[in-house]
Amino acid sequence: MENITDAIRKRIRQVLFRMLRETDFLTKDNQINTTAISPALIRSIFQTILKSCYCFLNGNTKEED
């Protein structure tokens, strides 16, 4: 991910925060809702995000496991 532009990095961050707010993992004040998140869930979320970013950066339209 070191080859991405600042604009892409900011967009990924913006989308990530929007996703976390929409799923109630973040409050409206951008505080983590700790009662909703287990370590396993955090790992799963970030693995999914990393796969999506990898596909986006490589121009793939489908994620592969």
Image (spheres, grey):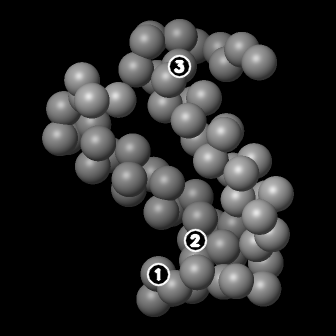
Q: What amino acid does circle 2 point to?
A: Arg
Q: What amino acid does circle 3 point to?
A: Cys
Secondary structure of the residue carrying numbered label 1: loop
For image coordinates 39% across by 45% down, the residue present is 12
Determine whether 61 is above or below 48 in the image.
above
Q: Quadrant of residue 58?
A: top left
Out of 1 and 8, give the one closest to the viewer: 1
Residue 49 on image: x %, y %: 58, 41
For image coordinates 60% across by 29% down, the residue present is 51
Determine whether 10 is above or below 41 in the image.
above
Lower sequence index among marks 1 and 2: 2
Label for residue 55?
Answer: 3
Most extreme residue toward the left, as rendered? Answer: 6
Q: Quadrant of residue 33?
A: bottom right
Most extreme residue toward the front, as rendered? Answer: 39
Position of 19 with respect to 2 (left or right) is: right
Mark 2–mark 3 distance (CA, rounded to whole Å): 23 Å
The residue at which mark 2 appears reads as: 21
Residue 22 on image: x %, y %: 63, 67
Position of 9 with respect to 58 (left or right) is: left
Position of 42 with respect to 53 (left or right) is: right
Lower sequence index among marks 1 and 3: 1
Q: What amino acid does circle 1 point to?
A: Asn
Secondary structure of the residue carrying numbered label 3: helix
Mark 1 vs 2: CB contact within 8 A: yes
